[in-house]
Amino acid sequence: MATMMIGWAETLLRDLTQCQVEFHTASNPSASFEKLLDSLLSLTGSEYGFIGEVLYREGVPYLKTYAITNIAWNEETREFYEKNAPQGLEFFNLNTLFGAVMTTGEMIISNDPAHDPRAGGLAPGHPPLESFLGIPLTMEGELIGMVGIANRPGGYDEDLYHQLEPFRTTVTTLAFQFRSARQRNIAMAELASSEKKLTAVFDAILDGLVVIDFRGLMVDVNPAACRRFLRNRAEMIGKNVSMLMPEPYHGQHDQYLRNYYRSGVPKVVGGSRVVEGLRADGSTFPCLLGVTEIRDRNSRYFVGTIKDITDQRKQEEELQRARMALEDERRRLANIIEGTHVGTWEWNVQTGATRFNERWAQMIGYTLADLEPVSIETWVKYTHPEDLVASEAALEAHFKGKADFYEVECRMEHRDGHWVWVLDRGKVFAWADDGTPLMMFGTHQDITQRKEYEAQISHMAMHDPLTGLPTLRLARDRLQMATEQAQREKKCAAVLYLDLDGFKAVNDAGGHRAGDQLLKTVATGLRRVLRGMDTVARIGGDEFLVILTGIEDRESARKVADKLLTLVRDPIDIEGHAFRVGFSIGIAMCPADGNEQRDLIDAADSAMYRVKKSGKNGVEFFSEQECRETATTS
């Protein structure tokens, strides 16, 4: 059995390698898919099947074949096959077993299609369908194609599916390359004039092939791999494959392999991704790496296919430059950073017609289809009304030439109901002869995280880290607002300067930990006693500042002070120890003792020190002190 498995794996690897070579060298790459299908049918003992690409029409998937077995059963179907098979047959019925693969993106096994509700029945005259295996082809989470085979004696199971992993990986890579080549051809054709249609020819370079054992040591390489890495075969066989990788891949490879053996969770195995290769001369090159694992009872190997994509990257860069040159009137492309998460918008200022990219919609939890039809009113609908005012002002400044660019930070309502902060930037790139703005291009960048960081930093700067109370800096701002409100409403405000009596004794007896706990307990009590409109701040080691807003008179301030004294009347338990503390409270009134925040704080501080000198744990108004000093002088 083991010999059969090894032979089966070797045959599969040989056929896959041959088809890869033919795919890159043949004038008709689609013929490689036909050979791959023939090989798959032969190895699995299946009667017929297909390899196809999954495309979409108005958001609905359909199948277009690269290769398909001819199962025509009458003259009409034979003519249809001969006419359309070379270009690819298209199938739109999703109420089928292969339709279930396209709609779920998952493997489908059916060994009794006649009673399988997913099958949907067969056309009259269609050959019998006794069993079916549907294999999805995915690249970076996207379903790009599928393989279907039918009528294997004994049916299909998951073991066979997993044994076909090398086949699935290879077909996925070829399908991706085939589709990419076709897309590049289409893009080049769109850029060329009707008189000069360009045909994009994929660079027929053979992929490198490297086989490693379970230790990561190379056991075989092909000539293409030697050319890629500028090494001969003798230099590579028996060496760790990490020698072909620059950092950080070099240092991480062996650990990745050990993690895979331990957890079974792959990072590269079974898929493809872009990595860097390291040549013998120390230079690096970008490559598309696909890794397949082959197992039998006694051996475990990994096969890596390496495609140098340097030329492909250059072609993409040249294609981008060609677009920019040929579409001069659409200079917005010069500012688009493809592949980033920046939303883009283009606005006809005169008509209101607007174009967004998909990322613009994603930032607020939608797709472009969800927002259709779009216009400038779409932006207005989801932007915070307060920020629309700032946006209008910034646009006006840009339109009048007072600002080179339009820029504003604004909030947009997310589909889930929360607000997303966006940095909105743009510039007019087309003006009418009279100076009227015509077309404007811009970007949206999600800055929610940055705004949250700024809020956190602001909070840290304005609040005491131990108690969470405002600092003196924030207290001054609150006091300024309180005095202004008092003047407007013809009422009073009060500043209470609190010094915690007995705090040093707590520190001496229980240490700083006990002292910190006491401060937090006192802070919690102060917040509980005061109104929500009032402010309590920690302004020193054992000093607090209380700001009372909109009170009627001195008696109101006195009542609050009495409550604060009651707060520390009883001993406070800290970690099983009872500590007795008190408050020395000085009070300054606005406007009686002044309107300036500095004067009021100094006055309250002065009154507090008078309490300290007279025995602590009491209350003193600054104006009372002044009256006594005046009487003494007289």
Image (spheres, rainbow, N blue to C red):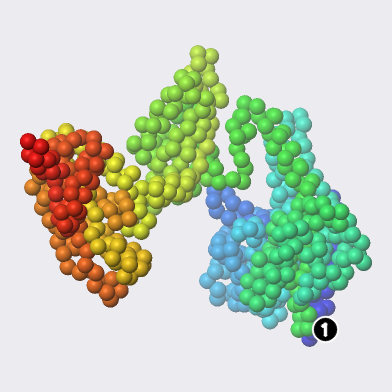
Q: Does residue 625 appear left or right of residue 81 in this picture?
A: left
Label 1 SS: helix
Classify residue 133 by image quadrant: bottom right
The residue under label 1 is 3
Q: Position of residue 489 (x, y in %)?
A: 14, 35
| Depth order, front residue of 619/532 | 619
Residue at left offset 37%, top offset 34%: 388
Viewer-nearest residue: 186 or 402? 402
Crowd band around label 1 with a 10 angstrom C-alpha radius: few (<14), some (14–19), many (20+): few
- Looking at the picture, tell me which residue is in the foreground, 107 or 616: 616
Instruction: State left or right for residue 583 relative to residue 2.
Output: left
Image side of residue 350 versus residue 563, left or right:
right
| Rendered position, 411 above or below 212 | above
Q: Looking at the figure, which quarter contains the C terminus?
A: top left
The image position of residue 559, as x and y in percent, is 10, 52
Classify 354 as above or below 284.
Answer: above
Whether residue 620 can be seen here = yes
Closer to the camera in the image, 216 or 540 = 540
Residue 5 screen position, x and y as percent? 78, 80
* Residue at position x 72%, y 61% in the image: 249
Residue that appears at 41% across and 32% down: 391
In the rendered structure, which amino acid carries the disc numbered 1? Thr
Q: Residue furthest top?
A: 434
Location of residue 623 in the rendering, given as x and y in whole percent from the top left corner: 13, 41
Residue at x 76% of width, y 75% of height: 214
